């Protein structure tokens, strides 16, 4: 005769089966909630008149804003401190922030199609935008004015324009300060966002290395690309030509010149025909402007070489100087030009021309 189970066995078995069923049901409900947690829509997720906790994630268009938010006026939500911005995850991956906004951020349009948001000062501190994928989180934009941006523009190839006056110079590439005037996001994988990228456009300013007012644009198909997965920065190219007016060692160079960039040695190369005004020549009633053939290279934030082939005429006292074959080469140590070549001299009364060869000599025009 078989032995019966001990007293209470069936009650215990029934209790455990019930707990197992309830636990599975709760997990299924959590999974359903997790799968439905994010809704990719063009409006701000509704918040039902409640104050949000720190690190709350709000979705505007295709982007998530993560930070400390609370209800503002109307349907707006206001965040302060640091607000992180990146693509809304689409494949179960973790949120991957691309920008860090410090200041007061207002998101507009709960329950509407609005994708705009504004950035302004938080107290006495100016609002800033930094690039999160880079370890130093460099600030590329800083403003004390209320600025309205559009999340929908950030995910377009054309990007979101920024006021050039608020741009902060930061040496992201080749040790030359870069001033950002446009930001856009790129999601190369499309199915998930862990390798999302930031593209920056704007201009390099070479003033800090002695090339006063020389700027090189990064526009059109060119950009500075910041990859969030590899933490690398790549300059894809620069504007092929620029119309410029810059000064180096008391020589003002003006005109349209060609520009190229070589990533391997972080080198900018400038070349072309332009005009050069040489300042401070003793005995000359005015600073002479001559034709110039420019050949200049800047590598890793330093002037590598400058060569100027000059042509033209100018007066020193009553003596007319005709430049036949005169070259200025820049001495990077003394920051002066070394001049050599030949000149023709002609007196004002029409006396015969005298030609003279010049040994290499320094033109005493230091920066």
Image (tube, rainbow, N blue to C red):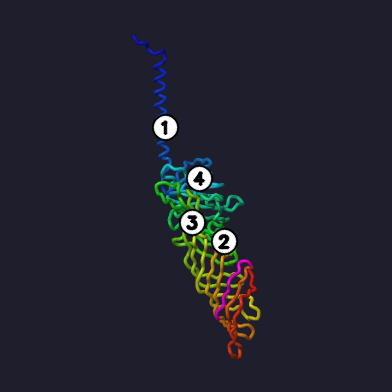
Q: Which residue is mark 1?
A: 27
Q: How many marks?
A: 4
The residue closer to the viewer here, 316 or 79, is 316
Q: Kindly check if marks 4 and 2 are in contact, taking CB atoms under 8 A apart as contact.
A: no
Q: Check whether the beta carbons of the residues at disc 3 and disc 1 lie within 8 A of each other.
A: no
Measured in 3D between alpha carbons, the distance from the residue under mark 3 to the one under mark 2, in whole angstroms, is 16 Å
Q: Pick whichever of labels 3 and 1 is earlier in the sequence.
A: 1
Discs 3, 2 touching: Cβ within 8 Å:
no
Q: Quadrant of residue 39?
A: top left
Question: Tag 2 or tag 3, which sits nearer the N-term?
Answer: 3
* For marks 4 and 2 on the same chain, the one whose residue lies earlier in the sequence: 4
Residue at point 46%, 57% (across, down): 159
Q: Secondary structure at mark 3?
A: strand
Residue furthest to the left: 1
Q: Label 2: which residue?
A: 301
Secondary structure at badge 2 equals loop
Is 303 situated above or below 122?
A: below
Residue of label 4: 66
Give the foreground label among 4 and 3: 3
Alpha carbon distance from label 4 to label 2: 37 Å
Q: Which residues are magenta?
A: 324-333
The residue that disc 3 covers is 234
Whole-number angstrom distance, CA of label 1 to CA of label 4: 26 Å
In the rendered image, residue 33, in percent from the top left (x then y), is placed at: 42, 37
Tell me the mark number nearer the camera, choosing from 3 and 1: 3
Give how far across and how far down residue 215 sits, in percent. 54, 65
> Tag 1's secondary structure?
helix
Mark nearer the viewer, 4 or 2: 2
Residue 183 rendering spot, x and y as whole percentages:
48, 56
Graded by Cα atoms within 10 Å as few (under 14), some (14 to 19) or many (20 or more), the crowding at tag 1 reads few
Relative height, residue 337 to residue 230 (above, below): below
Disc 4 from disc 3: Cα separation: 27 Å
């Amino acid at each position: 005769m078989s032995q019966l189970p001990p007293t209470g066995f069936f009650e215990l078995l029934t209790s455990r089966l019930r707990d197992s069923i309830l636990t599975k049901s709760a997990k299924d409900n959590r999974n359903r909630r997790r799968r439905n947690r994010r809704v990719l829509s063009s409006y701000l997720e509704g918040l039902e008149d409640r104050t949000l906790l720190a690190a709350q994630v709000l979705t505007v268009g295709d982007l998530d804003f993560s930070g400390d938010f609370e209800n503002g006026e109307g349907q707006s939500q206001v965040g302060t401190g640091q607000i992180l911005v990146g693509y809304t995850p689409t494949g179960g991956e973790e949120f991957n922030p691309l920008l860090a906004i410090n200041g007061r951020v207002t998101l507009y349009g709960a329950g509407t199609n609005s994708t705009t948001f504004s950035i302004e000062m938080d107290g006495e501190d100016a609002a800033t935008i930094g690039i999160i994928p880079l370890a130093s989180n460099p600030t590329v934009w800083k403003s004390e004015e209320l600025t309205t941006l559009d999340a929908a523009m950030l995910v377009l190839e054309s990007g979101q324009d920024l006021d050039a006056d608020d741009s902060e110079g930061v040496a992201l590439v080749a040790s030359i300060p870069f001033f950002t005037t446009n930001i856009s996001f790129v999601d190369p994988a499309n199915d998930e966002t862990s390798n999302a990228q930031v593209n920056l456009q704007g201009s390099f300013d070479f003033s800090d290395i002695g090339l006063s007012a020389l700027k090189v644009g990064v526009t059109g198909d060119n950009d500075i690309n910041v990859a969030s997965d590899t933490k690398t920065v790549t300059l894809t190219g620069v504007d092929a030509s620029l119309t410029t007016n810059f000064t180096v060692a008391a020589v003002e160079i003006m005109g349209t010149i060609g520009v190229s960039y070589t990533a391997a040695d972080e080198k900018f190369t400038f070349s072309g025909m332009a005009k050069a005004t040489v300042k401070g020549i003793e005995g000359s009633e005015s600073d002479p402007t001559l034709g110039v053939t420019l050949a200049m290279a800047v590598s890793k934030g330093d002037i590598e070489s400058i060569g100027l082939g000059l042509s033209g005429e100018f007066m020193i006292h009553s003596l007319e100087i005709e430049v036949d074959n005169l070259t200025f080469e820049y001495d990077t140590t003394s920051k002066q030009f070394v001049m050599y070549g030949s000149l023709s001299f002609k007196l004002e009364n029409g006396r015969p021309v005298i030609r003279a060869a010049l040994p290499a000599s320094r033109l005493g025009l230091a920066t």
